Image (spheres, rainbow, N blue to C red):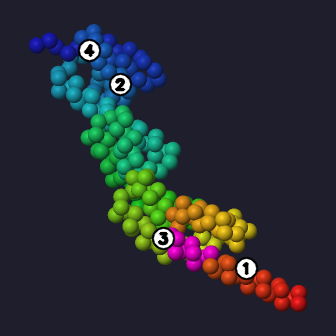
Amino acid sequence: MDKNIISKIEKYKKLYYNIFINNEYFTTLHSEVLDKFSLKEGKILEDIDLEDIKIYAEERKARERCLYLISYRDHSWKELYEKLLKSVSEEVARKSVQKMEDIGLIDDIKYGMALAKKYLVIKKWGFKKAKYELSLKGISSENIDIIFREYQYEVDILDNIKFIIEKKHKKNLLDYKGNQKIIASLLRMGHSYSDIKIVIDDITEDINTEDINTEDIND
């Protein structure tokens, strides 16, 4: 059986090198991998060595990719896993993401809580749309339930609806077509029809009361 001999190591870019075995291109490796396996021209490698090198290089690539993505923004377990699948195997992607979770660099509950706050407190969405958006981010249904048990008591959905109407739609509230557009807009934001109706009825009653009081003063 022919021996596997590193015939050439040439610099590719920065800290990466092209590795040739038996005068044929094998792979491109980071200098860290070269150092770990003491790779140099003329070194003889067994088949098992070649496999170990490939696995280690792939795991290193996945780790670096994870750290880069996490530094850019928080990710859910599923988001990170699916992004890694574009460049590494399923097994390496799973192990790498699990490692990130084990050392506390990703946390679906913490990430989901931050998103829920953004959706419910800042954007003033309803629970329905907020939960849907969390599911798109890869948060599991079990974790979504945990997250929203927390926010269910911290966010007043009726106040959210009232804030949106008074800020953007109050002038159109008494017009039928305007009223229907307001309802449609709030439904798209994930609010329930029953909640929307409660708030609209309350605001409409306040407007009518103000009008009656104004008429009494003028009389």
Please state if 2 lies on the left or on the right of 82 as rendered. left
Q: Which residues are magenta?
A: 192-200
Q: How many marks?
A: 4
Estimate the x, y position of residue 110 in percent, counting from the top left: 44, 60
Q: Is residue 120 above or below residue 61?
A: below
Disc 4 and disc 2: Cα gap in Å? 13 Å
The amino acid on which the numbered mark 1 sits, given as a three-letter code, is Ile
Going 22% across and 28% down the picture, which residue do you hit? 51
Q: Which residue is mark 1?
A: 207
Mark nearest the camera among 1 and 4 is 1
- The residue under label 3 is 151
Q: Nearer the viewer, mark 2 or mark 1?
A: 1
Q: Which residue is mark 2?
A: 29
Could you tell whether 155 is left or right of 206 in the image?
left
Foreground pick, 87 / 196:
196
Q: Earlier in the sequence, mark 4 or mark 2?
A: 4
Residue at image point 73% right, 85% down: 209
SS class of the residue under badge 2? strand
Instruction: Give yes or no for contact between labels 3 and 4 (Cβ–Cβ under 8 Å).
Output: no
Q: Which residue lies most toward the left here? A: 1
Q: Is residue 146 visible?
A: yes
What amino acid is labelled 4 in the image?
Ile
The three-letter code of the residue at mark 2 reads Leu
Q: Quadrant of residue 59?
A: top left
User: Residue 28, located in which quarter of the rendered image?
Assistant: top left
Instruction: Read off the residue under disc 4.
Output: 21
Mark 3 or 2, nearer chain start: 2
Using residue 52 as the reference point, say whether residue 107 is left or right of it.
right
Query: Quick one: SS at disc 1?
Result: helix
Q: Position of residue 78 (x, y in %)?
A: 37, 49
Q: Nearer the viewer, mark 3 or mark 2?
A: 3
